[in-house]
Image (cartoon, grey):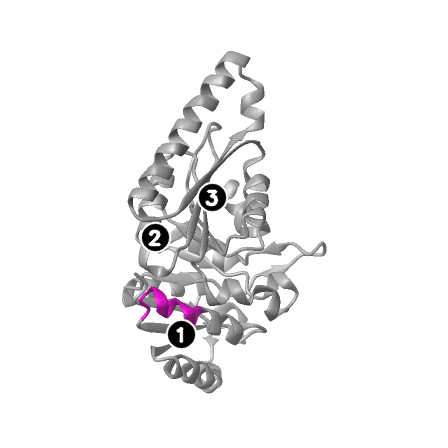
Amino acid sequence: MYKKILYPIKFEEFSLDLLSCILNFKKAGTEEIVLLHVIDVSKLPMDKYEGYSPEDVKRFSEIADLKMVEAVSMIENAGVRAKRLIKVGVPYREILEAADEEKVSLIVSGRQTKGIFGEIFIGSNTDKVIRYGNVPVYIAKYPASFGGSKEACARYCTTPFGRVLYPTDWSDCAKEALRYLKGLKDAGVEEVTVAHVMDEKAMKLQSPEKFKEFERIDKEKLEDVKKRLEIAGFKAKIHLHVGKPGADLIRIAREEDVSLVVMGSHGKGYVEGVLWGSVSRNVVEYSDRPVLLVKGNK
């Protein structure tokens, strides 16, 4: 399913650790990894009249090329083809352009940064790749979200598709994520937890009778998804809660000890406007588990 992966690499702390994790995608059919380093045009020394110097670009490119040697060696030693690209421009635009040109099936985001309270925040480039791109994005949390402890998350790295959380809000986007999830059957998925969180704010506005009706319908829908997954050969279980969708999904991911969250990036639920930037964004930013975002209809 992931024959060709694009990995934008900035040669930061954990870049090679993350690469070693990505190499486990070979179990899901990965045959080639495209390493892309973007020389950020905004970081180049600029002349007031002539712009950036070709000599500077050449020097930065030569340095990046040398830094890629170890990464290429890691990829090829794992029995996967490696390709290196060095581009100059606005990072997210170059990433999306390379993804299109190379016809990749997955983009792997780079390391996230930590806030003062230890939260994991995605960078602006990852945000824009998700917002404007059409290729699924794997947002890794290895090993930044564990304070650099490789041991704490090694099992999520070695079996990236072992236990999956699939959140759904019944939108077309969520249905697309389910279709996509079924394609991971041969990637080593052991169990899928199907979860739906009934938005507490919206439910408080309903009458007791209406709430019970919503609850009944949601239970039936969850059981239907579970049945369809089981027919497709997956082991599945369901979760139905009333609460705050983002926070509850993060909690469920921890309780079920999942290795991956697969969700749509433009889903809508009971409340209009639950888009990227809300539930899916909160899960991406605050969850300590990797997230695979599947693009749905806007």
Whether the residues at callouts 1 and 2 have beta carbons within 8 Å, the answer is no
Q: Which residue does the image show at 47% across and 73% down from the upper left? A: 19
Residue 298 visible in the shown view: no
| Mark 2, secondary structure of its residue | loop
Q: Which residue does the image show at 38% across and 30% down from the upper left? A: 221
Is residue 23 covered in magenta?
yes
Residue 26, image quadrant: bottom left
| Mark 1, secondary structure of its residue | strand
Instruction: State the residue in front, 209 or 54.
Output: 209
Give the residue pinned by disc 1: 35
Instruction: Say which label, 3 or 1, has the lower sequence index.
Output: 1
Instruction: Say which label, 3 or 2, has the lower sequence index.
Output: 2
Q: Which residues are magenta?
A: 22-30
Give the residue pinned by disc 3: 276
Is residue 113 covered in magenta?
no
Q: Which amino acid type is marked by label 3?
A: Trp
What x and y, as percent, mark residue 298?
A: 36, 40
Q: Which amino acid type is marked by label 2?
A: Asn
Whether the residues at callouts 3 and 1 have beta carbons within 8 Å, the answer is no
Instruction: Say which label, 1 or 2, has the lower sequence index.
Output: 1
What x and y, as percent, mark residue 12?
A: 56, 73
Locate the N terminus by quadrant.
bottom left
Locate residue 138 relative to residue 4 in the image: left or right.
Answer: right
Q: Residues within 10 Å of mark 2 (few under 14, many from 20)?
A: some
Main SS class of the magenta portion in the image:
helix
